[in-house]
Image (tube, rainbow, N blue to C red):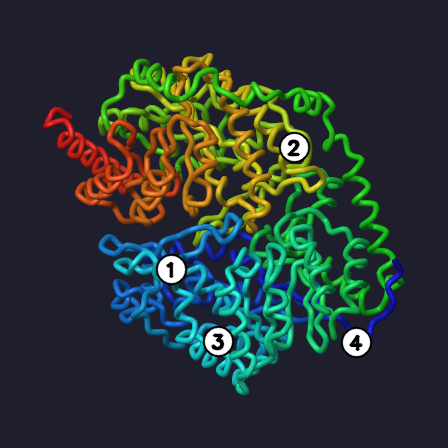
Amino acid sequence: MTAKPTAGAARATVYGYPRQGRNRELKKAVEGYWKGRVTAEALRETAAGLRRSNWRQLAEAGITEIPTGDFSYYDHVLDTSVMVGAVPARHREAVGTDALDGYFAMARGTQDTAPLEMTKWFDTNYHYLVPELGPDTVFTADPGKQVAELEEALALGHTARPVLVGPVTYLLLAKPAPGVAADFQPITLLDRLLPVYAEVLAALRAAGAQWVQLDEPALVQDRTPAELNAAARAYRELGALTDRSKLLVASYFGRLGDALQVLAASPVEGLGLDFTDSGAANLDDLASVGGLPGKRLVAGVVDGRNIWINDHQRALTTLGTLLGLADRVDVAASCSLLHVPLDASAERDIDPQVRRWLAFARQKTREISVLARGLAQGTDAITAELAANRADLASRAGSALTHDPAVRARTEAITDADGRRSQPYAERTAAQRARLGLPLLPATTIGSFPQTDELRLARADLRAGRIDTAGYEARIRGEIEEVVSFQEKTGLDVLVHGEPERNDMVQYFAERLTGYLATRHGWVQSYGTRYVRPPVLAGDISRPGPMTVRWTSYAQSLTAKPVKGMLTGPVTMLAWSFVRDDQPLGDTARQVALALRDEVADLEAAGTSVIQVDEPALRETLPLRAADRAAYLDWATESFRLTTSGVRPDTQIHTHMCYAEFGDVVQAIDDLDADVISLEAARSHMQVARELAAHGYLREAGPGVWDIHSPRVPSAEEAAGLLRTGLEAVPAERLWVNPDCGLKTRGWAETRASLENLVAAAREVRAGLTGGRG
């Protein structure tokens, strides 16, 4: 295609941008504030500086309309709860006393007050704070943050567009507040919420907003007729307002489906749609509803969730088709760039040719600008950029990194028998109990122990050459000895080595497998101040040698109690990496599973009796549309079984999942055929235990009794109460006692106190079950 110039310059825009700064300045400032080392004013100055830097970078890259309001100290959904006055009753006093401290109390909790529940943002690894609503919720408008950030950007000379979570998505993400009937539907509060949005829109118009973006990603999921009617009513009413800016309703992460007709018929001035692979059907759907005559279309043709360079020719073809379907077509990423790292040019350890295949946030903004220029001026205006793009795409397609014949031959040789245990669960559980000799309600942890400053310093010293390998390993041995000794003294029944040698549960393995690339600066926000560096899955995967056996075996040599081998499962290895987009995900999952299968075999041969293969991302990666889920769950559960099914019947296989809605995947959890599963349950008050019971799950389970994403220490009484709630759903002979998740992010003081309380709770409840003999 040779694109012809269009009338008027196409806008280049994005929906959001990474918040943390080049060196994670926001993380350091927020955590410094929590520790009392940074004042509130200094924190605000750091945040303002990061916003200015982001806007400058966007403008320099050619983004002609920048987003505001997407910046957050912790989470944009929590910001929305503040904006609409949906502060839980237990936090109102704290918010009223000090708005900033109250905000963080809602996010993290305090010793006396539980935080908001946290779960995954659609099918990403970003976590949001779940709004708590009820029939008595009273909304009040607080547009201060949005107005202030818009005014900052306008004062600097930018064309700015405030970005808000839309009212329908906000209500669909919410849950009934504690004490509210479980069947309460927050969407019934829409008529109460819309006037508050009207106040916010009026305030933004008064502050100078020409456009306001309302994000409605929940509409790309399957929605009932009642929910679609709610969306129609919401945008009919907001569109009818006279005191407002123009409205752009944006969806992303997939196909809008039936909601497209609803939004197209509404009196809003613009729509934003995803036209990457995940939302490709939007193109045909848009044509089928007659396009968007008289409206603005923001076309997400650059993938906002992955890090591979864009195919410019393909994107221009899509954009050329869209020109006939809307009054104006502008160019954007498919979603907020919050989900990718900041700048690929900082990755100096990656081969320069390979680095040319990568596009992080800064590179994506330039891609968007190039496409906007090509759309507005014709492809002759971007001849050089198109030639360079074609060369880089060809370089990747022809690279030896992406194709290993031995790996492909082994994957093609997989049989159905490779994914089945030699005995059914009912038979092998007796062999496991005889081998392990565990008490009723066995207590364990999920895997990691606190990653102390000393451990991080040791890794930094090793990289910098300040200590040699022998010195580093001596520090690791010392840490393992301390962790094992503490667990024995505390009374845990199944121990872990604490993972002191691991920087991250995915990156550690990626650095030891062929086909992966590790980044140095590729930080992405997971939640709050927690950032991860997803590795890049660039080619075929294999395992050159054992990855975990040495340190697991060393820990086992220190104790007579069983020590779990700890691995990250194949689905999570994909979900928390930037995956290759040149072959089906199922094929990649099988390659990873075979590499992990070799590690499981080596752990078992070394005497490890309990092996945990974590799959926290199983639910997170579930397709947003029900029609797409069966195919995903087939390869996802198969890859787990392929990893674990080669062991003896008396080797106990555990798995772990956290911070997701599990009700949709209970059958898949069963299909994993693990012997024990541990799941997050503390913030949701054992909801998952009830879901397992309703399903008829017959294996052992450990719904967590300690919310490790909060600094508060649960009392023994609190943990015992949760255990008793768990016993209402899971029989004592199948119930385990454990935290919600790993302890990497916690400090040693709270870890010691919390685990001591957890063991005390297990003993108390056990004694009640055994007549005082526990």
The first of marks 1 and 2 along the sequence is 1
Q: Where is residue 265 in the image (x, y as percent from the top left)?
A: 63, 74
Give the left or right position of residue 419, taking residue 327 as reference.
Answer: left
Q: If you read the primary sequence from the N terminus, does the residue marked by circle 3 or circle 2 appear first?
A: 3
Say whether residue 438 is left or right of residue 45.
Answer: left
Q: In the image shown, does 750 or 672 lie closer to the viewer?
A: 672
Q: Mark 2 points at which residue?
A: 587
> What is the spatial separation of the Cα atoms under label 1 and label 4, in whole angstroms?
48 Å
Q: What residue type is labelled 2?
A: Asp
Observer-side mark, 2 or 4, equals 2
* Label 3 element class: helix
Q: Which disc, if any, is residue 38?
A: 1
Q: Report crowding for label 1: few under 14, some 14 to 19, many 20 or more residues within 10 A (C-alpha).
A: some
Distance Cα–Cα, label 2 vs label 4: 45 Å
Residue 62 in view (yes/no): no
Q: Circle 4 sits on which residue?
A: 8
Q: Which of marks 3 and 2 is in front?
A: 2
SS at badge 1: loop
Q: Select label 1 or label 4 by which is in front.
A: 4
Q: What residue is rendered at 88% in x and 58% in y? A: 1
Return the mark for residue 148. Answer: 3
**Is 446 above or below relative to 246?**
above
